[in-house]
Amino acid sequence: MIRGIHHPGITTGDLDRSLAFYCGLLGFREVSGFGWEAGTEMSAFAGRIIGIPESTARSVLLHAGNAFLEVFEYQTPVSTRSDDRSLSQQGFAHLCFDSDDVIADHARLSAAGVTFNTPPTDVGPMRLCFCRDPDGNFVELQQITDPASDMVLRSVQG
């Protein structure tokens, strides 16, 4: 049986830039990292698993709170972004991170040059805002302002 979500994975064109965003600005910490070079036994093994033969990649697994995030950078084939998705398009739309103070996070990230769709907005029992990571992926910051209404906490607590 499925126990839950362990981690989403995203691909970036610049792993160091993504680490500056996810670790430096959002507070994730690196748990592990790995990679492989084209033409190696590991490349052949990874190519069979991921369906990209003769690839070269490096990856890190990040952790914050109850969330893991895996970030990949492919050097071969070169990773490019082929769309400018909106939140309404089919497919994975965004990553949502739990915040203990969305207003403070918004101010801190804005000061670091991150652009947001709107300032933090109260929506029922939560406060939220959306920005994009350095690769254009949508990131939602969410703060539960009424813990009694948090369905996730209620389901875990029984």
Image: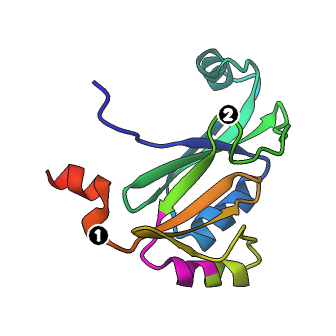
Report crowding for label 1: few under 14, some 14 to 19, many 20 or more residues within 10 A (C-alpha): few
Q: As drawn, which residue projects farthest toward the front?
A: 124
In the picture of the structure, the residue carrying the numbered disc 2 is: 90
Whole-percent x, y for residue 130 in the image: 64, 64
Q: Residue at x 76, y 71 (%)?
A: 115
Report which quarter residue 83 is drawn in: top right
Q: Secondary structure at mark 2?
A: loop
Q: Earlier in the sequence, mark 2 or mark 1?
A: 2
In the picture of the structure, the residue carrying the numbered disc 1 is: 147
Question: What colour scheme was applied to this rendering of the protein?
Answer: rainbow
* Front in this rendered view, residue 85 or 69: 85
Q: Say whether residue 148 is left or right of residue 68.
A: left
Report crowding for label 2: few under 14, some 14 to 19, many 20 or more residues within 10 A (C-alpha): few
Whole-percent x, y for residue 65 in the image: 38, 62
* Vertical order, 151 against 11 (above or below): below
C-alpha span from label 2 to label 1:
31 Å
Q: Is residue 104 magenta?
A: yes
* Vertical order, 13 against 43 (above or below): below
Q: Residue at x 53, y 56 (%)?
A: 96
Magenta region: 98-106
Please identify the quadrant where the N terminus is shown: top left
